[in-house]
Amino acid sequence: MSQFPLNPCSACGGEVRSQTIPREFSREGTTVRIEGVRALVCVKCGEVYFEPGATDALLGAANALFALSRQNHQVRDRLVGVAP
Ligand SMILES: [Zn+2]
């Protein structure tokens, strides 16, 4: 799906590994959580690197969840989306 290079961590020079992680966004008291986001995570310092373009896609997904939260008055303060 992606072939972005596994560079050493630019923060500490440690090894980075491809992982799927959850990502949370908060806005106006609402938190949305997107599970299964593929990213590179440094095994030493925990720095997280996203693929090029992934941040925009994540923000788009988060915005969609926030919009859903506003539309659906039954939604509590938390929505979870799952990345494909
Ligand atoms: Zn690091």
Image (cartoon, rainbow, N blue to C red):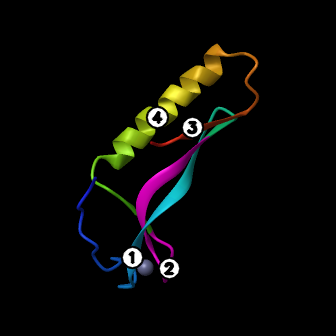
Q: CA distance from mark 4 to mark 3?
A: 8 Å
Mark 3 sits near ligand 1, with its Cβ under 8 Å away? no
Q: CA distance from mark 2 to mark 3?
A: 27 Å
- Neighbor class of circle 2 (other Cα within 10 Å; few <14, some 14-19, many 20+) is some
Q: Which residue is mark 1?
A: 16
Disc ID at residue 81: 3
Dominant secondary structure (helix, strand or loop) of the stretch shown in magenta:
strand
Amino acid at the residue labelled 3:
Gly
82 to 73, vertically: above or below: below
Q: Which residue is mark 2?
A: 45
Disc ID at residue 61: 4
- Neighbor class of circle 1 (other Cα within 10 Å; few <14, some 14-19, many 20+) is many
65 to 33, vertically: above or below: above
Amino acid at the residue labelled 2:
Cys
Mark 4 sits near ligand 1, with its Cβ under 8 Å away? no
Instruction: Report the span colored magenta.
Output: 33-47
18 to 24, vertically: above or below: below
Q: Secondary structure at mark 1?
A: strand
Mark 3 touching mark 1, by CB under 8 A? no
Which quadrant is home to the C terminus? top left
Mark 1 sits near ligand 1, with its Cβ under 8 Å away? yes
Amino acid at the residue labelled 4:
Ala
Mark 2 sits near ligand 1, with its Cβ under 8 Å away? yes
Please say whether residue 25 is one of the residues in the magenta stretch: no
Mark before the other along the chain sequence, 1 or 2: 1
Query: Residue at 39% across / 85% down in the picture?
Result: 14
